[in-house]
Image: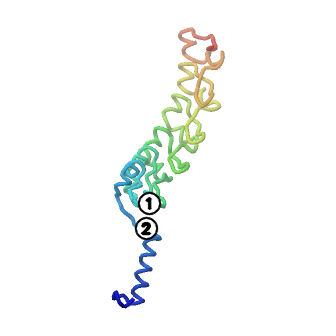
């Protein structure tokens, strides 16, 4: 060891530093290889061969923040949280006010009730992260009173029998009161 000017203690420190550097890997913020992931999901830093999120500003500038509310840094990923979902634009429009699997989504019927699609289309029930029509949701909606779509089926309001026809303006004002099944 002495021939290269490194004593045993200095050699061991250098070896330890190299070992720690190899174990934790180097980071490169705004890495070129992460350009698309940075734009799409806020993962802008190359670390250990993959792209990860390392700053809340990267999350907030990403498309994932804009489209799914994944605006907060959680570990090394951008995810939705109760806070980000409450401020998410999709909260008002789509009821995406709660967090579900790391993205903003409707998690209660109250989230759906505040959207335009509840009174208009009967989409008032939160089911599997979406607002859908279920049960009696359609009966109080505009599509029932105007277009006789008063029964919920497959998450939407539709006309599925004679009782639906009688409930709408199409029957009362225009005489379209007979149910005819499409073939």
Q: In the image, is residue 128 above or below residue 176?
A: below
Q: In the image, is residue 45 above or below residue 113?
A: below
Most foreground residue, 15 or 128: 15
User: Mark 1 and mark 2 in contact (Cβ < 8 Å)?
Assistant: yes
Give the number of the disc on residue 63. none
Residue plotted at (53% across, 28% down) = 121
**Which residue was labeled with disc 2?**
25
Q: To which quarter of the image does residue 138 belong? A: top right
Q: Position of residue 33 (x, y in %)?
A: 37, 54
Most foreground residue, 172 or 5: 5
Residue plotted at (51% across, 40% down) = 95
Give the number of the disc on residue 49. 1
Q: In the image, is residue 88 above or below residue 177?
A: below
Residue plotted at (40% across, 58% down) = 56
Q: Residue furthest toward the front?
A: 3
Q: In the image, is residue 119 above or below residue 112?
A: above
């Amino acid at each position: 060891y002495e021939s290269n000017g490194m004593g045993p203690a200095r050699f061991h420190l250098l070896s330890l530093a190299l070992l720690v550097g190899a174990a934790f890997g180097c980071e490169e913020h705004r890495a070129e290889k992460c350009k698309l992931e940075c734009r799409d999901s806020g993962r802008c830093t190359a670390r250990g061969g993959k792209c990860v999120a390392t700053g809340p500003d990267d999350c907030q500038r990403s498309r994932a923040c804009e489209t799914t509310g994944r605006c907060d840094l959680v570990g090394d990923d951008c995810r939705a949280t109760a806070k980000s979902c409450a401020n998410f634009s999709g909260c008002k429009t789509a009821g995406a006010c709660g967090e579900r699997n790391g993205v903003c989504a409707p998690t209660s019927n109250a989230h759906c009730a505040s959207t335009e699609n509840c009174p208009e289309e009967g989409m008032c029930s939160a089911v599997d992260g979406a607002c859908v029509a279920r049960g009696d949701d359609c009966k109080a909606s505009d599509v029932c009173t105007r277009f006789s779509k008063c029964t919920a089926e497959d998450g939407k309001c539709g006309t599925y029998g004679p009782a639906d026809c009688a409930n709408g303006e199409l029957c009362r004002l225009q005489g379209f009161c007979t149910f005819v099944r499409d073939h």
